[in-house]
Amino acid sequence: MTVRGVLLDLDGTVYHHDNPLPGAAEAIDRLRERGLSLLFFSNNPLYGGEEYVDRLQSLGVDARPGEACSSAVVTQEYVDDNHAGDDVFVIGSASIRDRIARGAANVVAEPRDADVLLASWTDEFHYDDMVDALRALDTGTIYLGTDPDPTFPGPDGHPVPGTGAVLRAITGVTEREPDRVLGKPSEVAIEAALDRLGRDPEEILVVGDRIGTDILLGERAGMRTALVMTGVTDDATLSASDVKPDHVLDSLADVETLLE
Amino acid sequence: MTVRGVLLDLDGTVYHHDNPLPGAAEAIDRLRERGLSLLFFSNNPLYGGEEYVDRLQSLGVDARPGEACSSAVVTQEYVDDNHAGDDVFVIGSASIRDRIARGAANVVAEPRDADVLLASWTDEFHYDDMVDALRALDTGTIYLGTDPDPTFPGPDGHPVPGTGAVLRAITGVTEREPDRVLGKPSEVAIEAALDRLGRDPEEILVVGDRIGTDILLGERAGMRTALVMTGVTDDATLSASDVKPDHVLDSLADVETLLE
């Protein structure tokens, strides 16, 4: 196959928090010199695409407008496309709530009014949110999540709960699984990536550190996949996984070895 | 069979919040006139046995010292018997934390120090508790819960999250199921009930409103079981359940119809 587009995860692949990973910026420069389409795609639901472009540039990575996407972006697009005019109750950060409110749906303050419950990451998740989730999901309400990541590395490197933990807490009390979880590896995320990259799936290489999101997305979509060992996945996790990447790289710095 | 002891659930069986259920106090008087051993057993982990005796008396129910038990009581006994001197990190109410601290184990403030994580109901459950659970359960720690009830009826009659919801939230982020959940229908609760009633299982009638705790406890222990329809269980839930009570009563007021 000839690679014509690269779908790049961010945290754990290009940087860790505020620190670019060694060789990542240079590797991206070389991908760009080959004329490849690039898309940076984070499952972090706190920020939008242009915020990620700014962030990457501030870290010395040559990212350009329109080249970044996130679970927040695909969630907003999905809600606008499918729930325009619907009443949405949000459990999550002010950031995702504001983003949805700027779109075509109505964000409501009363869970019993909800047509849709949207749940996302917030470090203010509280018992009262579980009460609200019970109220919102009592009848016919659609239940959406921004992304499935159960944990992510906290500032001290130890894992902290992610959106997936919030979703499971809600499922635990309501006994309802989400109807859709919208970040990687969802179909919605695959469509968003293909639209932005403008390439066929078999021309795309996915590079990421998380088997259940980055690599699974690539496998589902028929893309080539490369796992980098600079993030959450260790050898034991890789060995135990049913999902197998096509390639395993020490880091993004080695990505060029996969290109002819 | 001849019934010689009756194990009675409280909320939904004898009372709803501060309201005794119609005929409940009189039914208990008649059980007492027959010379039966009585034990009131709540899965609510906020209160101890003597608090329940006081509460029942204040509602006009003839409950006597030593006749009440709760998930908090069996949890405290279990921790004292099995974890004397161990470091216990508690996620739950101040009430359960204080109860454990008064016993033979050490309640610790740092989750990484924990030999045991004990999780229970608290309406202050927060994201930071999920972070603490991740820290506490990283290696070799025993994970206990006070009781399994996912919801209970709130003050307005609508369900609110119970200890079971807290346990599932913790399991969702840590991917660890509790090693033991100590209220009804656990083996620990069965032993506690048999000790207090002083009767053989086949001489005991369990009366309660919850299939998964009251009726399941009776089924596991070889007791006779009666479901009352004054609490959380409706006809649809009963029909859908694999656990079947021996008897279904409109309310505790009818319990005498089961006795010869």
Image (cartoon, coloured by chain):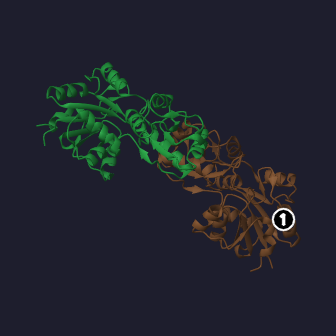
Chain colours: A green, B brown
Quadrant for the N terminus of chain B in the image = bottom right
User: How many numbered markers are drawn?
Assistant: 1
Residue A251 horizontal/vertical position (percent):
25, 35
- Residue at left offset 78%, top offset 59%: B14
Report which quarter residue B37 is drawn in.
bottom right
Q: Residue furthest toward the front? A: A85
Report which quarter residue A47 is drawn in.
top left
Q: Is residue A20 above or below residue B185?
A: above
Residue B152 horizontal/vertical position (percent):
66, 51
- Residue at left offset 38%, top offset 39%: A183
Residue A86 horizontal/vertical position (percent):
49, 38
Asked whether residue A130 is in view, the answer is yes
Few, some or many residues within 10 Å of mark 1 (<14, 14–19, 20+): many
Asked whether residue B125 is in view, the answer is no
Amino acid tagged 1: Ile
Using the image as rendered, state which of residue B24 and residue B34 is in the foreground.
B24
For the residue labelled by badge 1, is the local secondary structure a helix, a strand or a loop?
helix
Q: Residue furthest toward the left? A: A260
Q: Is residue A54 above or below residue A137?
A: above
Q: Which chain's residue wears label 1?
A: B
- Residue at left offset 89%, top offset 70%: B33
- Residue at left offset 27%, top offset 44%: A218
Using the image as rendered, state which of residue A110 and residue A12 is in the foreground.
A110
Quadrant for the C terminus of chain B in the image = bottom right
Q: Is residue B55 above or below residue B38?
A: above
Residue B157 horizontal/vertical position (percent):
70, 49
Q: Circle 1 sits on which residue?
A: B28
Report which quarter residue A40 is drawn in.
top left
| Left or right of residue B95, residue B257 in this image | right
| Left or right of residue A110, residue B60 in this image | right
| Left or right of residue B253, residue A46 in this image | left
